Image (spheres, coloured by chain):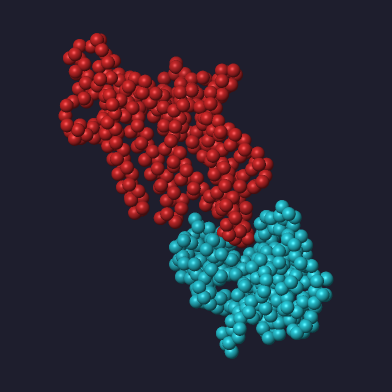
Chain colours: A cyan, B red
């Protein structure tokens, strides 16, 4: 199922520069995305998920700055590439589906122009005929009638716009697709349809997906592996199955209990007490300890590193087992 | 297309309302052109001659409805009556020459200010916080804070009087007659430089700032980030994506400014003794030339309507969401 590492993120740090000094939004995150897998990243709002992927893609706008680590694709460091080298790799090899489909399309350009733009930016010699054929094929892939190719975005429904955004991501047949909450703005029925289509396409075209959402049940359903982010750090990383049945970090367990299960006996839902810490002034040691019900003195000292529990299952917690 | 026709219908209605107001208002004002004229020629004209002139100016005892219909009939045949100030030239001829000069300096300065201001706004927003973005807006806001006639007087004093680089008055040298010769056109351009510069300097800042601000907001949109991420070169992102969208509010502003062009350059024209519409309007008021005033008001109103219709069409073409 999962092959060689395709995209490697190592010790990535991203700061936001503010008037009160830098705020570290992503703090030393390390993981690998393997050939053909779906890696999910989950976490509360503000845990650094979106910042992380914009750091990977180098699409951070000011005041975001990458302050450390490296991002390798096929052995080449994306972070040290010149803008022109980066421009060529980006989208050709790593494409991205943006969070808000409603605003991700240029309102004054047709779907065709926006697809053709993408192809032409990487293959300047493509003929008009080729641009149209490939654009239509990309629309067909995501389940849109190719006859709509000359439509303007405002004439399309939210679901169709999101499909168009996915078509733009797939039109160059990239090897990695990063999806930042691709379906949050859509209703559940449309969300399911679109995700199913994406999963089919992944099988057909063989790309890997880095999937970001705060919808944990959805993530457990579709991901091969899952990373849980808390306050800019990876709290836990492991196979979806292991996280579901044997979560090692108290924060992950809290998240699991915060969602209702659709099968099995009724359980009492419990959230996690308290609020995520301010990143401008994070608590020392493990950043989760003020909200953790099994915290001990050691948690307030040094930040616990990620430790391997079972093969490929890592957690950043001082406790060895669930019960401390 | 249906939208364009609907707009056209709206403007036709507005034009009719303007024509009618133009007929009704002077008749509601105290005093009338007839007595003004009697006073003007008092003791210099035979009563018969005065009577003939009154008839020529259309002061009859006919009912209002009849007068209104006559007014409309004359209007559609291009007859705006006779000017008193420039007696006996027809008002349409007097306005015609004034209109050309006003359209020239006000139109040219509006287009220059709009195009230049918009381009500067695009570059300032694109290099936000750069040298251009930090230096130019305050400088232009400073210039724009002066009344434009004051700037005109300053330019006139410095470059016309002190340095003598440019002519101080009129649209062209007196010894040249209007022809399409290079000499005449060059002379007109030379005369137009100071008035045009004064209007451009006063209005440039507004165009630049509004374009810059809208564009800065547009640059934060997700579709800009997507356009950058998918590998478009920055020139295309700047122009085809960001500027193309940011332009829409500015074009609407351009339409409104077009309307002020014909009446608005009045003071500039007076400073430079420029024979445009504004100069005519002053002459008309001074001489109680009702026919000329009425004609100028009508011209300004119609010009505003036509300009707005053209801008509506432009927006229709630029923004698919309005179709």
Q: Nearer the viewer, residue A117 or A213?
A: A213
The answer to whether A63 is drawn above or below residue A289 in the figure is above
Q: Position of residue B303 (x, y in %)?
A: 37, 36
Residue occupying image coordinates x 27% and y 34%: B24
Residue found at the very far top of the displayed protein: B43
Q: Residue at x 44, y 34 (%)?
A: B261
- The image quadrant that residue A79 belongs to is bottom right
Is residue B72 visible in the rendered image? The answer is yes
Q: Is residue A258 above or below residue A149?
A: below
Q: Is residue B318 left or right of residue A39?
A: left
Q: Which quadrant is the N terminus of chain A positioned in?
A: bottom right
Q: Which residue appears at 55% of the width and 37% of the height?
A: B204
Residue at (48, 22) in percent of width and height = B272
Across and down, in percent, residue B321 comes to: 44, 56
Q: Nearer the viewer, residue A225 or A306?
A: A306
Q: Is residue B119 visible?
A: no
State which quarter of the image contains the C terminus of chain A: bottom right
| Of A97 and B281, the residue lying toward us | B281
Lateral position of residue A146 relative to residue B130, left or right: left
Residue A127 vertical position relative to residue A273 in the rendered view, above or below: above
Name above or below for residue B89 compared with residue B143: above
Residue A172: image quadrant is: bottom right
Indicate the position of residue B220 as horizontal and vertical percent values: 60, 55
> Residue B237: where, in percent of width, then height?
59, 53
């Amino acid at each position: 199922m999962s092959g060689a590492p395709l995209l490697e993120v190592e010790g990535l740090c991203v700061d936001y520069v503010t008037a009160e000094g830098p705020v570290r939004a992503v703090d030393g995150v390390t993981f690998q995305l393997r050939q053909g897998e779906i890696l999910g990243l989950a976490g509360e709002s503000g845990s650094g998920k979106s910042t992380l992927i914009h750091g990977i893609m180098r699409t951070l706008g000011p005041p975001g700055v990458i302050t450390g680590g490296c991002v390798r694709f096929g052995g080449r460091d994306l972070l040290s590439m010149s803008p022109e080298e980066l421009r060529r790799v980006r989208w050709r090899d790593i494409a991205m589906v943006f969070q808000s489909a409603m605003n991700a399309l240029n309102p004054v350009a047709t779907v065709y122009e926006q697809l053709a733009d993408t192809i032409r930016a990487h293959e300047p010699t493509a003929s008009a005929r080729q641009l149209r054929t490939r654009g239509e094929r990309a629309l067909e892939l995501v389940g849109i009638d190719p006859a709509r190719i000359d439509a303007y975005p405002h004439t399309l429904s939210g679901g169709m716009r999101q499909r168009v955004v996915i078509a733009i991501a797939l039109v160059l047949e990239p090897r990695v697709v990063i999806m930042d909450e691709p379906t949050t703005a859509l209703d559940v029925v449309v969300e399911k349809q679109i995700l199913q289509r994406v999963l089919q396409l992944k099988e057909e075209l063989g790309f890997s997906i880095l999937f970001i959402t705060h919808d944990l049940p959805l993530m457990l359903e579709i991901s091969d592996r899952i990373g849980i982010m808390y306050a800019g750090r990876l709290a836990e990383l492991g196979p979806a199955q292991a996280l579901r049945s044997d979560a090692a970090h108290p924060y992950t367990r809290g998240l699991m209990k915060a969602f209702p299960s659709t099968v099995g006996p009724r359980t009492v839902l419990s959230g996690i007490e308290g609020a995520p810490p301010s990143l401008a002034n994070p608590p020392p040691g493990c950043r989760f300890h003020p909200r953790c019900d099994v915290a001990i003195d050691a948690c307030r000292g040094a930040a616990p590193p990620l430790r391997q529990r079972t093969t490929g299952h890592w957690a950043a917690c001082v406790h060895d087992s669930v019960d401390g | 297309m249906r939208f364009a026709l609907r707009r056209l219908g709206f403007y036709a209605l507005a034009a009719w309302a303007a024509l009618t107001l133009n007929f009704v208002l002077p008749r509601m004002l105290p005093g009338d052109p007839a007595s003004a004229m009697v006073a003007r020629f008092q003791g210099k004209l035979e009563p018969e001659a005065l009577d003939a002139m009154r008839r020529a100016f259309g002061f009859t005892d006919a009912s209002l409805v009849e007068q209104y219909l006559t007014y409309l009939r004359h209007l559609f045949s291009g007859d705006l009556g006779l000017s008193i100030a420039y007696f006996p030239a027809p008002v349409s001829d007097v306005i015609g020459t004034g209109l050309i000069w006003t359209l020239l300096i006000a139109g040219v300065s509006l287009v220059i200010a709009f195009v230049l201001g918009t381009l500067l706004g695009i570059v300032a927003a694109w290099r936000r916080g750069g040298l251009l973005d930090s230096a130019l807006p305050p400088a232009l806001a400073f210039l724009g804070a002066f009344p434009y006639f004051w700037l005109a007087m300053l330019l006139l004093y410095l470059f016309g009087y002190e340095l003598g680089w440019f002519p101080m008055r009129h649209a062209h040298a007196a010894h040249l007659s209007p022809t399409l010769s290079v000499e005449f056109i060059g002379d007109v351009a030379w005369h137009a430089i100071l008035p045009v510069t004064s209007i451009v300097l006063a209005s440039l800042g507004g165009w630049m700032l509004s374009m810059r601000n809208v564009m800065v907001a547009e640059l934060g949109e997700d579709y800009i980030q997507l356009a950058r991420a998918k590998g478009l070169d920055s020139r295309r992102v700047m122009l085809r994506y960001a500027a193309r969208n940011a332009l829409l509010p500015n074009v609407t502003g351009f339409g409104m400014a077009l309307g002020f062009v014909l009446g608005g350059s009045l003071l500039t024209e007076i400073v430079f003794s420029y024979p445009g519409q504004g100069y005519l309007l002053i002459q008309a008021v001074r001489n109680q030339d009702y026919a000329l005033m009425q004609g100028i008001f009508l011209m300004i109103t119609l010009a505003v309507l036509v300009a707005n219709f053209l801008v509506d069409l432009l927006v229709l073409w630029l923004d698919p969401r309005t179709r």
